[in-house]
Amino acid sequence: MNNMSTLFGSMVFNDAVMKERLPKDTYKALKKTIQDGKTLDSSIANIVANAMKDWAIEKGVTHFTHWFQPMTGITAEKHDSFISPNADGTIIMEFSGKELIKGEPDASSFPSGGLRATFEARGYTAWDPTSYAFIKDGILCIPTAFCSYGGEALDKKTPLLRSMEAINKQALRVLKLFGNEDVSRVLTTVGPEQEYFLIDKTLYDQRKDLIYTGRTLFGAKPPKGQELEDHYFGAIKPRVAAYMKELDEELWKLGILAKTKHNEVAPAQHELAPIFTTTNIATDHNQLTMEMMKKVATRHGLVCLLHEKPFAGVNGSGKHNNWSVSTNTGVNLLEPGKSPYENAQFLLFLCAVIKAVDEYQDLLRISVANAGNDHRLGANEAPPAIVSMFLGDELTEILEAIDSGSAYEGRETSVMKIGVDVLPNFPKDTTDRNRTSPFAFTGNKFEFRMLGSTFSISGPNVILNTIVAEALSQFADTLEGVSDFTAALNDLIKSTIKTHKRIIFNGNNYADEWVKEAEARGLYNLKSTPEALPYFVSDKNVKLFLKHKVFTETELHSRYEILLEGYGKTINIEALTMLDMVKKDILPAAISYVKELADTVVAKKAISSSISSDAETQIIEKLSLLSSSLYKKTEELEQSLLDVKNCSSELELATYYKETVFVAMQELRAVADEIETLVGEKYWPYPTYGQLLFNV
Ligand code: ADP
Ligand code: MG
């Protein structure tokens, strides 16, 4: 790559391209649609579509697709060519405004959580002009929202856009109270840091568990793991560096601001972070990033594992969702200001987040719940699944001073009054010392760290936007029309801190004491997906989503079903894969090895009865016992799967998978892993953890 400036965004129909290629009026109308969320006139859509098509054809594109994000968590596309027949048998390349704006994929083959029973199978995709069209693999991709014919959202983009609208509306009410007349739009921004593993493709291809489930279901601990802490930020190996370079270039072409890359804690684990952008674009970009990570890996003979816990005993992968709120005038509302007045506004937005996180811990927890992430949250190798907030000592001291009405830092003479006293400037680097907090203030944004690496960031941001919108809405209700704004603001901030300070925890979240302490504070500890999910449809939460028009009640229930179902299906596939691996590969391997040993004993005896066969005999004994045990555990797991039919609801089923099937899987694995340590390497059917983790 020699010219970065021509490479970046070269595959994106972005603002610069639109400006260059669209008639002035059309460009202006489109900009207005993008900025104000206005609907687009069909004559304008035709002009835009045509310009898009011409631009794409110049780049060798022949097809377009409505690119959307169904509830599978990955993206979907169906390709249509631009060709249109003429009467004389020739063709022209056509792309109409109608085709740009609306598509009609069959909705019946995507998860809908019961929605397809009540609605037509047909669904439609609608262009989201707030996210730029782009070219991927020679296809013009139009970012779209995906709905059922009745208008119920079937995707991850629609509720995200709704939640952004909700927080925009409520934040504007609050900003007006502070006299910000020039602000017309408030947007949330996100920079998601993405973790992943890279392993050799030839080794990957030999592991059914990785192929079918994305994680290893068996594998004894290698002699070396991550205990030396020599991988984090370590020198990047040439093969990985070549991969990262190509990945960056692919992402840059798509206008994705890939910025930082480094090795992570576990061997073979790495991270990529982009520069933050508007939440819906960040979401599209993160989906594309994950897709590209996998695609580019195969070109390097590698496989990119995005699973939350590909290997037991070493760190899993997550995603850090750096989130903030800013105005169209360029003000970050979570950035402490320089004047007292700005700081009062900052404190109110900070309080909104504190209140939101405390009141809706359950929703935040649910937004990061799936079978894969259950290995990272609340499991034995992982931090607890408790949601709490880290604010740093300085900010916490300020809040405590406000709460107690006492003086802060050498200000013995004056009781701290928000909006009157000048708050100190918070040096950014003092606020991010706690790496164990699930939700940390990092100077001018919050970092939500509980996301799993496979997740679409849509879900967690839908929740964040909506719960903060709710807190802001209550604040606006309280403050609008009061006669003494400063006094009312003081009271509000004070009472919010008093009520919600239990959610603030600056200590070590990984310590056992925190679990007890959190319980004493009355915080939730929802350890697994089946435990967390029912809260999704509690009265309190249904009310929230309806009020802010983020989900209808039907949509909520459909999503709840999809999540429960997804959990059970995941465990079921894992269990079936384990059974297959044990019966087809692991038991036969143990048996062959025992036979080899037994043959050796016989051969030795034939030579002379005085030759010792102690080693062989002992291994035979151990392996025979373990093999019997393995077989028994296999039968138990099989039986547990047969008993699935006794469950009468989706929730009961998910709970059963967790409490019975998953437990049987763990027991089976323990025996198989022990067998692995005894069987000769050339008999073992799979690449070992050592090979997988240290081979690239
Ligand atoms: P670190 O977490 O290593 O200290 P940074 O704080 O620079 O690194 O940024 C981490 C991520 O947070 C990056 O993706 C960055 O773009 C993003 N980020 C920075 N500012 C904001 C913001 N205002 N809103 C959302 N994300 C942000
Ligand atoms: Mg970070």
Image (cartoon, rainbow, N blue to C red):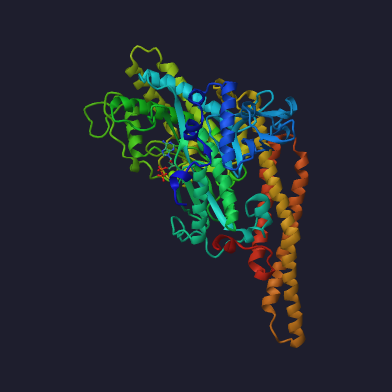
Foreground of the two, 204 or 575: 204
Residue 453 seen in the current view: no
Residue 91 seen in the current view: yes
Which quarter of the image is occupied by the C terminus? Answer: bottom right
Q: Is residue 168 above or below residue 196?
A: above
Say which residue appears at 40% left-offset and 40% top-offset.
Answer: 506
Dividing the picture into quadrants, the one containing residue 548 is: top right
Dividing the picture into quadrants, the one containing residue 623 is: bottom right
Foreground of the two, 636 or 375: 375
**Residue 75 at x, y = what percent?**
62, 39
Quadrant for ligand 2? top left
For residue 475, side relative to residue 458 (left or right): left
Say which residue appears at 74% left-offset and 47% top-offset.
Answer: 640
Dividing the picture into quadrants, the one containing residue 352 is: top left
Total marks in image: 0
**Residue 82 at x, y = what percent?**
66, 35
Foreground of the two, 283 or 94: 94
Say which residue appears at 70% left-offset and 54% top-offset.
Answer: 578
For residue 553, side relative to residue 430 (left or right): right
Q: Is residue 595 above or below residue 150?
A: below
Q: Is residue 357 above or below residue 310?
A: above
**Residue 251 at x, y = what percent?**
51, 45
Residue occupying the far front of the picture: 88
**Residue 65 at x, y = what percent?**
64, 36
Residue occupying the far left of the picture: 413
